Structures are given as C-alpha cells and as structure tokens.
Amino acid sequence: MTRKVYYVFGLRIQSNIAIPGFTPFPNPPSVDVTITLGSFPEHLRRALPADQEALYVSPDCGGDGVPNSRVWSVSNGEYIRILYSDGTDCVVDRNGTQVWIWWPELCEVVDVVPYLQGQLLGLVQRLRGVTCLHASAVLIGESAIALTGPRGSGKSSTAAAFLQLGFPVIADDVTPIFEEAGRFMARPAHPRLWLNPDMVKNLYGSSEALPQFAPSWEKRYLDLNSAGPGLPLEAKPLVGVYVLSDRADEPDRPKVTEAAPQDTMLQLLCNTYMNHFLDPEMRSREFALLSRLQQKVPVLLVHPHNHVSKIPLLCQTILEDVAERALSRRAILHRP
C-alpha cells in the first residue's frame, strides 16, 4: 500500500490512505506523525472507559444528548482516546507521534477530516510541546497577526474578510506558535478555512457560494491553496495578537484598544488551544512561554460592531493598528 505524506502545522504526516483536503508533500526524508485511518490499535481494548475516568467531557451535546466529545487516558497513560458523538473513535499516543481514527459504517473518511484538522492535530502539537493559540492567523506583508477570542467571536469570518481584501490566511482556528532567534513565530496550519452558512451568505452573497466539505458537516470551507497565493510552508514573525470581544451596536466601533497589563496574560491563557489537556508540567511550560510572548508581542482588544457589513471596516481598523505599531518599532530601532 502506497502511503501518503502531507505537511500540516509544520509536521510531516504520513497516512495509510489519502486525506481529502490535504496537499501531498513529496519525498520527505522522515516523518513526524503516522496516521492510520479506518483502524483502531489492536493492542487496546475497544471497551468504553467509565465516564468517571474521563479527562474531559464536552459541555455541548448532540441531538441525542450524547456529549460531542469525551476524552480518556488509557493504557496507564500511554495513549489518549477521544470518542465523538457520531461514533468516531480516535487514539493518540502520549508522544504525539501516532494517531488512529476509526469510524462507524455510516461515516466515510471525509466525515472525520474536520476532527483531524482541529482537535486531533491540535492535541498532537500540545503533546509534542508546541503551544497553540485558539486563533486564526493572517499574513500582512511578511508578518503574521493572530485573531483570537472566545467561541463565536468571529475569528474565522474576520480571517475570511481579510482574505477578500487580499491578505493570505495561514491558519484557521488553531495557530501554532514558537520562539526562534528571540522572536515569536506563527506556523502555517492546514489549507482549509471553515465558515458557518450564515456567514458565507453575508460575505459571499449566498450560503452555497462555498462548497460543503461533507454532508455530515454544516460548515462550508475555503480552500486556501486556491484562494490567493496559497499556504506558505515557512513560519512567519508574529507581530500582534488581536482578541475579539463581544459585538455591540455602538457608533465608535469597530476599534482597537490596549489590554490592561494585568489582563494580558489572562487573555492569552484563556485563548490557547486544547488547554484542558495540559498536565502540571505542560501548564508550567506554557505559562513561561506566554509570559515571554506578552513581553514581546502586543496583545490588543478588538471591539467589533455587531452588523456584518462592518467586518471590512473591522479589518481596516486592525490594519491601521498594525501599520502604526510597525512605524513605532522602526522609529525605536532608528533612534539615535
């Protein structure tokens, strides 16, 4: 069987079958993660762990009352198992090097790809020591900004609006960050941006303007490799974290304000991805990294208007803030 290799989230991923929506990566010297689709590890029991042992239970439930996801540590902590409400069953080894995904007969491989692109590869990165912001990332020139905020705050829709203005999106919902030569970098993620049908209608005129990835998923998607210059392979310097707040119908919105110093760290901690899986050692490493991040990268509060027609103006407001801060940085560098 010919195995497929992809480059996603800065990881060389090898799969036993083709993954819809992933772009093949030719002839890597080695791989970081092996994914086995349509299979469950033979050495692990299929018996469902007791709910009281769960590491995490999603507060959201499907129509049948089953939590959207439940997570257990299994085999003496060697593996993490995630069971989704549709019956999709996933196992990730503790080192973040192997993933198995099994699905019931009513599903197909295309139905499980959103799990892989989001929670599973987010977990893989956390297990490998990479901190991820729950954010979309946009490329402005040769630098990146992260758009973060609570669920439903408009991260993906704002990123899509930036794309309409000609600014490439390098990550949707999950943005890996790391330090390199004294700078913080944002790593490109996967070539898909997901949007709810109502936002597709607002941005593109019709809820069917973008394709549906699979019948089982309501969201529509943008292919980032065909919408513009494509997804870059290399990481980009992170020059700002913009935290989207609640929308309101106020005349001075949209606007960008400074976060209070005592709130900056809280904003970062609240907007990291898969933070409910962190053990004490991982939390300590993340806290140290975010402490350094807030000292080097501005964390700003964004106050959007509640009318969708203002989203382009929101993007323009953020762009003006980015430009002003770039001028300030250059002035400081050239100060005699």
Image: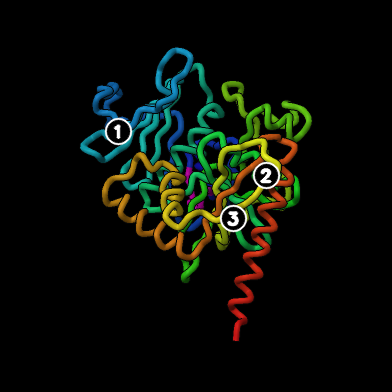
With respect to residue 92, does 331 lie above or below? below
Along the line of sight, the residue nearer the viewer: 142 or 22? 142
Frontmost of labels 3 and 1 is 3
Are there few (<14), some (14-19), or many (20+) residues within 10 Å of tag 2? some
Labels in figure, total: 3
Q: Residue furthest left?
A: 76
State whether residue 226 appears in this view. no
Q: Is residue 71 visible?
A: yes
Question: Quadrant location of residue 261?
Answer: bottom left
Tag 1: amino acid: Leu
Locate residue 20, reporting x and y percent.
Answer: 59, 35
Task: Inspect the image, locate mark 2, and give the three-letter code of the amino acid beneath it.
Answer: Arg
Q: Earlier in the sequence, mark 3 or mark 1?
A: 1
Quadrant of residue 202 within the rendered picture: top right
Residue that numbered label 2 is attached to? 253
What whole-number distance in Å separates the C-alpha atoms at marks 3 and 1?
Answer: 32 Å
Mark 3 and mark 2: Cα distance apart in space: 20 Å
User: What span is colored magenta in the figure?
Assistant: 8-14
Q: Position of residue 331 (x, y in %)?
A: 63, 76
Q: Which mark is residue 55?
A: 1
Contact (Cβ within 8 Å) of mark 2 with mark 1: no
